[in-house]
Image: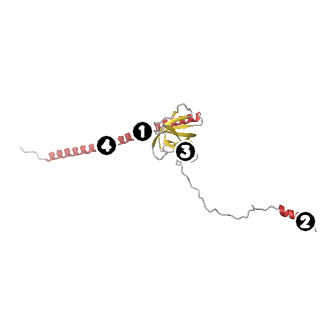
Amino acid sequence: MASTEPEHEHREDEEAPANEDEDTGAQVAPIVKLEEVAVSTGEENEEPILDLKSKLYRFDKDGNQWKERGAGTVKLLKHKETAKVRLVMRQSKTLKICANHLVLPTMSVQEHAGNEKSCVWHATDFADGELKDELFCIRFASIENCKSFMEKFQEVAESQKKTEENKDASVAAGLLEKLSVEEKKTEDKAEEEVPVAAEKETKSDLEKTEKKDEEPASST
């Protein structure tokens, strides 16, 4: 006997999809709460005057060869208060410091022989946590970037030289001013002592005169 149940009811049951992603409204609190931590880079009181991507090498004296220090961004940072400028370079991924030294008036940068995209310079570096004399070589993606780095490096070295000269002049002026003040104090003290001595001498003479007047005239 043929079934009298409507076929469309079975179709509706089969075609109704299971709503597995239905939002139940339940809220799950995170197991661990992470707090935002302020990270100090040590560059907060400095302003960048140069920022270029590059690759840095140092000369290994023992192996007599160049060794790569890392690829990243080289910066020249000027301190807002002291006006000192330092060179800092970090690796792009790990942010490990590759170079960290002041740009001094005695420094000079030169083009690397045979490569217009590279230049070299000597520095007393502190990247490893201790001062080391290093010979650095840096390579840029273009000749223009290399020239910009060399020009800014030399410009900073010259400006630091003028700063040192001005500082020495200020110190010398301060010493001269102090010396002048001390000399003036000595002169003032001498001038004060002279009237006192003169007053004592005048008083002594006056006493002698009065004593002479009081002596009786000798009888003849």
Residue drawn where x is 55% and y is 35% of the image? 118
Residue 138 vs residue 187: left or right?
right
Q: Is mark 2 on a helix, strand or loop?
A: loop
Q: Where is residue 110 in the image (x, y as percent from the top left)?
A: 51, 33
Please state the horizontal and vertical placement of residue 125, each as a whole percent of the image. 47, 42
**Whole-Å distance between the Cαs marked 4 and 1?**
27 Å
The numbered mark, 4 or 3, whose residue comes first in the sequence reads 3
Looking at marks 1 and 2 on the same chain, the residue that comes earlier in the sequence is marked by 2
**Furthest residue toward top:** 114
In front: label 1 or label 2: 2
In the rendered view, does 48 fall on the left or right side of 186? right
To which residue does mark 3 refer? Answer: 90
The foreground one among 211 and 132 is 132
Q: Which of 43 and 133 is in front in this view?
A: 133
Q: Which amino acid does label 1 sit on?
A: Asp
Q: How far apart are marks 4 and 2 (CA)?
A: 126 Å
- Classify mark 1: residues with Cα within 10 Å, few (<14), some (14-19) or many (20+): few
Residue 84 visible in this rendered orientation of the protein: no
Give the foreground label among 4 and 3. 3
Asked where in the image residue 20 lies, by quadrant, the reply is bottom right
Q: What residue is disc 4 on?
A: 186
Alpha carbon distance from label 3 to label 2: 76 Å
Q: Earlier in the sequence, mark 4 or mark 2?
A: 2
Q: Mark 1 points at which residue?
A: 168
